[in-house]
């Protein structure tokens, strides 16, 4: 019942939003719907923290601690995004940049997008999970191209082409896993624990049970394809090139959702497959793969961030960096590391969503996305500038924000499993990124000659969600209580 | 399956090989005549009789031989080498019979390199006179040859992978033993690649236009521009033999039915008739293709040939996969 | 279906898939490329149908029908509309010339053959032996996607990858579970529809375009 509700509530809100032309109350409706998802996610988390899984729909849906954690993350970011979306669409329609019908389409697609992500994390069948992840690409393409400018269309073209290729490779990987599961080795043929031929084979529980008997040769190829394929959706190097374009061109709330949760939903898929592959191959193989893509992403992000002139693109590259860090954390693979990875997913989602939403607001007010053209924000728009500044601080991993804790724990875990050199390289990259982002941020917030205009108040529709997002991010960095048991239960799902 | 050459069979093998040689020497020019006739008819003309190429040869033989001023010995020797290499290839290959003389030498690589040798000598001859057109023709011919010869090699290699030997008579014999092979995907691919090679090697449309004398578009004709009289006759004959040989080889390798597996004269007669029929069918098909297509621009020719090469590679891979 | 007829039919249909993939790299005429794609879709459907007949699997038969209609007819029809819209540029624009790309294609096919040894070793039979063909199609699609600049040819590249993956799925496992397979086919169809709409929107916004014109976003 709970799982049905989680999927139905946002979808129904989307249908309603599609039927009626855009109006403010529709925006509030979607916000409330996404808030409901968050609440239901918390209930779900409370019920699965004791390491028991909840199933529904004849086992097609299944929630363990990891899924419910992801539901909470999705619910949180979706809530923030929908809340700010009211303002975003309001301004667009006011300025006649888009029509009310267009707004309705936007709201529908956002809600479908959220529903697809929820389906992906709640599906017990890994094939169904793949379909849901692929569906997110389809739903978001038009959202990326929402503004219909040349650049937005270009970004959405690249986005759908590259991501579809990636996701096709992931499908190939899934097929190979299925093939390996159909023909287990080291076990009598026709053994009872594997169904002979059917949907059950790709279920998470049966795959985990059989993972020790999967053919290593096939699983190696499968895992490489899965890392490459889902890695595309995560935005990991070498298939990251769509990410800066799509995230910088999409409307701010969509960027927040894509950067804040879509990337990590794809990573969630990777975590699941990693657990299965580790059962078949030992931890070394997927660790090598993840270290390669993780370090690659960090280096790409560090080297390309230096030349960025556009603050939304800067944030997008920052996402690549964080996905690289998460990949490295997952490479370490210990229980501590996975718990830190999950906390990082939440912290990064919050901070990145806040920053994208704030940058959307800056874009609305200033009309420019180049860092050069919006100097001295703090003097001119104290609240918005403050939010942006604190968001950057959070994203750079300074205390008291939760990213500090999670980065620290990931590095500890990496050192503990003998990946000290990896941790060293990642620290160097992080230092470079720190310096670059500080320089950009300094200009954006303090630099230049402040024009003589008076400071402008920021709409409450913007400030309330963003400030609360930042507060939550800080709270999770300081308080261990509500989250820690859930994180450990979730980590336990994918670590033996 | 493979008949071994015993001492008593040697004489018969020599005879059949001579039959092959005579058949191709006479048949090659006739095939050219048939193709010209088909083209003429398809274009609504009556056309020359099909033995016109033989008549041309006879007429050329009676003429005087002229050499360019600073040319070396390559120019007069080349036609003989061309004809000789083609003749050796014809003698050892399984065209009429699966037991030609020297059948153990009839290796895929030997035959391809014999053909290659002919092409190279002709290209050298084109360069020898030092004229612009000769050089241009040689250069173009080598560009095409560099792509066509590997494609030919790989196309036949696909068959030899299937048959487990690179000996041509054994490949043919194995095909006879396994009729179902002929319809396999690797055979189809190799056949298409082979046809493309035939078009290229023998200078047919869409790669070259054998009847053109427009210098800028010539390939083969430019190369042999310096020849006259009996030497031109030899070059023309050599080219006709190569066409006849490649067509017969294609017929034997891909559709071997009717080929003689013994030295029984009756079988050989049947084989000659069957081979002629198969070659004529392929030749008519090529001629009709020529009527329907335009000549490719020169820089597009490599695309066609590498396409043929890839098809041949595909054929080998498919062969390995489905084995 | 069983015996040699099964083997031959499977070989032939799978071979046709790969040949069509090569043809898309070989030809420049976009209409010919789309036709090759259409034939490939039909061949893919035939592979599924042959396997379904061999294994007496009704679900797979249904999938075969869906694949045949979606990939053999509907998707190529959508692409043909796109080609027709822009009669001025019917040729693909390749960033490396066709001969070179064909040679690369030959190399990729060999690579696919080498890589898939592991897969066929697990369960050697007629169908799994053909998996290199599927992987080669994936690689060729990837290559097409990277080297061609026209919107239509990029979509074709994507579809080649997809067809290759589907072929591997059919050959190795006689199709992943019905629901997943249908979902995947539907997804592909939707992607193509989205791309089709996107391409027309771009056509309206930018005029007839090469993707080379998409140069505004880069680092």
Image (cartoon, helix red, strand yellow):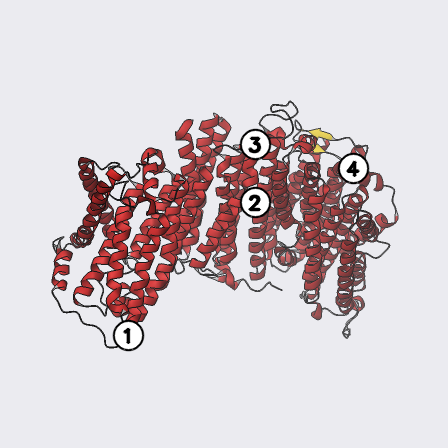
Spatial distance from mark 2 to mark 3, Cα to Cα? 17 Å
Residue B234, quarter of the rendered image: bottom left
Q: What SS does tag 1 mark?
A: loop
List x then y, in percent, for residue B239. 24, 58
Which disc, if any, is residue C177?
3
Which disc, if any, is residue A492?
4
Q: Chain of mark 3?
A: C
**Vertical comparison of A186 with B72: above or below:** above
Out of C196 and C23, give the one closest to the viewer.
C23
Kindly indicate whether the residue at mark 4 contacts the one at mark 2 (C-beta within 8 angstroms): no
Which disc, if any, is residue A182?
none
Kindly indicate whether the residue at mark 2 contacts the one at mark 1 (C-beta within 8 angstroms): no
Which of discs 4 and 1 lies nearer the camera? The answer is 1
Q: Quadrant of the N terminus of chain A?
A: top right
Q: Which residue is mark 2?
A: A168
Residue B124 falls left or right of residue A490 = left
Q: Chain of mark 2?
A: A
Spatial distance from mark 1 to mark 3, Cα to Cα? 70 Å
Residue B176 falls left or right of residue A360 = left
Q: Badge 1, how many Cα within 10 Å: few under 14, some, many 20+? A: some
Q: Chain of mark 1?
A: B
Q: Which residue occupies 47% across, 25% down?
A: C56
List x then y, in percent, for residue A395. 78, 56
Q: Which residue is mark 1?
A: B131
């Amino acid at each position: 019942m709970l799982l049905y509700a989680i999927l139905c509530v946002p979808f129904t809100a989307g249908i309603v939003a599609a039927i009626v032309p855009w109006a403010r109350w529709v925006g509030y409706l979607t916000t409330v719907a996404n808030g409901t998802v968050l609440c239901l996610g918390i209930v779900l988390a409370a019920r699965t923290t004791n390491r028991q899984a909840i199933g529904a729909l004849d086992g097609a849906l299944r929630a363990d601690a990891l899924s419910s954690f992801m539901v909470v993350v999705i619910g949180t970011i979706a809530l923030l995004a929908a809340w700010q979306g009211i303002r975003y669409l309001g301004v667009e329609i006011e300025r006649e940049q888009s029509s009310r019908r267009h707004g309705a389409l936007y709201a529908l697609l956002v809600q479908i997008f959220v529903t697809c992500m929820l389906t992906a994390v709640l599906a017990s069948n890994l094939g169904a999970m793949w379909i849901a992840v692929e569906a997110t690409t389809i739903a978001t393409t038009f959202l990326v191209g929402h503004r219909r400018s040349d650049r937005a269309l270009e970004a959405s073209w690249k986005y759908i082409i590259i991501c579809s290729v990636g996701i096709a490779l992931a499908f190939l990987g899934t097929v190979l896993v299925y093939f390996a599961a159909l023909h287990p080795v080291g076990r009598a043929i026709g053994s009872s624990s594997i169904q002979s031929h059917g949907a059950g084979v790709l279920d998470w529980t049966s795959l985990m049970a059989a993972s020790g008997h999967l053919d290593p040769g096939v699983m190696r190829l499968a895992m490489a394809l899965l890392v490459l394929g889902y890695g595309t959706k995560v935005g990991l190097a070498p298939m990251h090139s769509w990410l800066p374009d799509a995230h910088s061109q999409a409307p701010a709330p969509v960027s927040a959702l894509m950067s804040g949760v879509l990337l990590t939903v794809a990573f969630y898929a990777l975590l699941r497959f990693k657990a299965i592959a580790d059962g078949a191959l030992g931890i070394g193989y997927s660790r090598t793969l993840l270290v390669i893509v993780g370090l690659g992403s960090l280096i790409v992000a560090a080297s390309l961030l230096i030349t960025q002139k556009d603050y939304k693109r800067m944030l997008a590259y920052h996402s690549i960096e964080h996905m690289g860090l998460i990949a490295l954390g997952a490479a370490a693979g210990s229980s501590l590391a996975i718990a830190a990875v999950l906390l990082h997913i939440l912290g990064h989602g919050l901070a990145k969503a806040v920053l994208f939403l704030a940058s959307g607001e800056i874009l609305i007010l200033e009309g420019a996305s180049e860092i050069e053209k919006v100097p001295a924000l703090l003097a001119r728009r104290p609240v918005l500038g403050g939010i942006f500044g604190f968001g950057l601080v959070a994203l750079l991993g300074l205390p008291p924000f939760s990213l500090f804790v999670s980065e620290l724990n990931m590095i500890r875990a990496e050192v503990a499993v003998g990946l000290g050199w990896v941790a060293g390289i990642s620290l160097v990259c992080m230092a470079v990124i720190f310096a670059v982002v500080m320089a950009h941020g300094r200009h954006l917030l303090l630099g230049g000659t402040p024009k003589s205009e008076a400071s402008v108040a920021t709409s409450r529709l913007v400030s309330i969600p963003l400030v609360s997002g930042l507060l939550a991010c800080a709270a999770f960095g300081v308080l261990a209580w509500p989250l820690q048991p859930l994180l450990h239960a979730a980590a336990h799902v994918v670590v033996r | 399956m493979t008949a071994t050459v015993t001492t008593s069979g040697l004489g018969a093998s020599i005879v059949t090989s001579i039959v092959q040689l005579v058949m191709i020497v006479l048949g090659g020019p006739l095939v050219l005549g048939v193709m010209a006739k088909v083209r003429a008819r398809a274009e609504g003309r009556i056309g020359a009789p099909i033995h016109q190429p033989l008549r041309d040869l006879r007429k050329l033989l009676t003429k005087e031989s002229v050499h360019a001023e600073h040319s070396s010995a390559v120019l007069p020797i080349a036609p003989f080498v061309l004809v000789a290499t083609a003749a050796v290839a014809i003698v050892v290959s399984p065209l009429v019979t699966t037991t030609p003389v020297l059948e153990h030498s009839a290796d895929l690589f030997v035959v391809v390199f014999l053909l290659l040798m002919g092409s190279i000598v002709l290209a050298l001859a084109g360069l020898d006179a030092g004229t612009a057109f000769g050089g241009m023709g040689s250069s173009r011919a080598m560009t095409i040859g560099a792509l066509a010869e590997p494609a030919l090699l790989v196309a036949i290699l696909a068959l030899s992978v299937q048959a487990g030997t690179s000996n041509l008579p054994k490949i043919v014999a194995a095909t006879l033993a396994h009729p179902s092979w002929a319809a396999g995907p690797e055979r189809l691919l190799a056949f298409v690649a082979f046809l493309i090679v035939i078009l290229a090697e023998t200078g047919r449309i869409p790669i070259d236009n054998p009847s053109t004398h427009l210098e800028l578009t010539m390939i083969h004709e430019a190369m042999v521009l310096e020849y006259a009289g009996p030497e031109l006759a030899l070059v023309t004959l050599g080219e006709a033999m190569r066409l006849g040989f490649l067509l017969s080889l294609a017929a034997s390798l891909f559709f071997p039915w009717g080929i003689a597996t013994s030295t029984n004269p009756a079988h050989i007669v049947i084989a000659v008739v069957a081979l002629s029929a198969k070659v004529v069918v392929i030749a008519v098909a090529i001629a009709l293709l020529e009527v329907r297509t335009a000549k490719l621009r020169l820089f597009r020719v490599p695309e066609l040939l590498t396409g043929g090469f890839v098809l041949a590679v595909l054929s080998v891979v498919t062969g390995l996969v489905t084995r | 279906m069983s015996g040699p007829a099964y083997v031959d039919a499977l070989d032939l249909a799978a071979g046709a898939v790969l040949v069509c993939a090569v043809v898309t790299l070989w030809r420049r005429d976009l209409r010919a490329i789309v036709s090759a794609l259409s034939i490939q879709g039909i061949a893919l459907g035939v592979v599924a149908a042959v396997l379904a007949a061999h294994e007496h699997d009704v679900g797979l038969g249904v999938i075969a029908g869906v694949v045949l209609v979606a990939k053999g007819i509907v998707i190529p029809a959508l692409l043909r509309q796109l080609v027709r819209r822009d009669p001025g540029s019917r040729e693909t624009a390749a960033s490396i010339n066709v001969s070179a790309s064909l040679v690369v294609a030959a190399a990729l096919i060999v690579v696919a053959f080498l890589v898939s040894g592991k897969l066929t070793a697990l369960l050697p039979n007629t169908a799994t032996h053909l998996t290199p063909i599927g992987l080669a199609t994936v690689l060729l699609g990837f290559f097409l996607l990277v080297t061609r600049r026209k919107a239509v040819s990029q979509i074709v590249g994507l579809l080649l990858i997809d067809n290759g993956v589907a072929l591997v799925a059919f050959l190795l496992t006689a199709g992943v579970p019905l629901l997943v397979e249908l979902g995947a086919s539907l997804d592909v169809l939707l992607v193509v529809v989205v791309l089709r709409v996107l391409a027309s929107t771009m056509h309206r916004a930018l005029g007839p375009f090469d993707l080379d014109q998409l140069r505004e976003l880069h680092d």
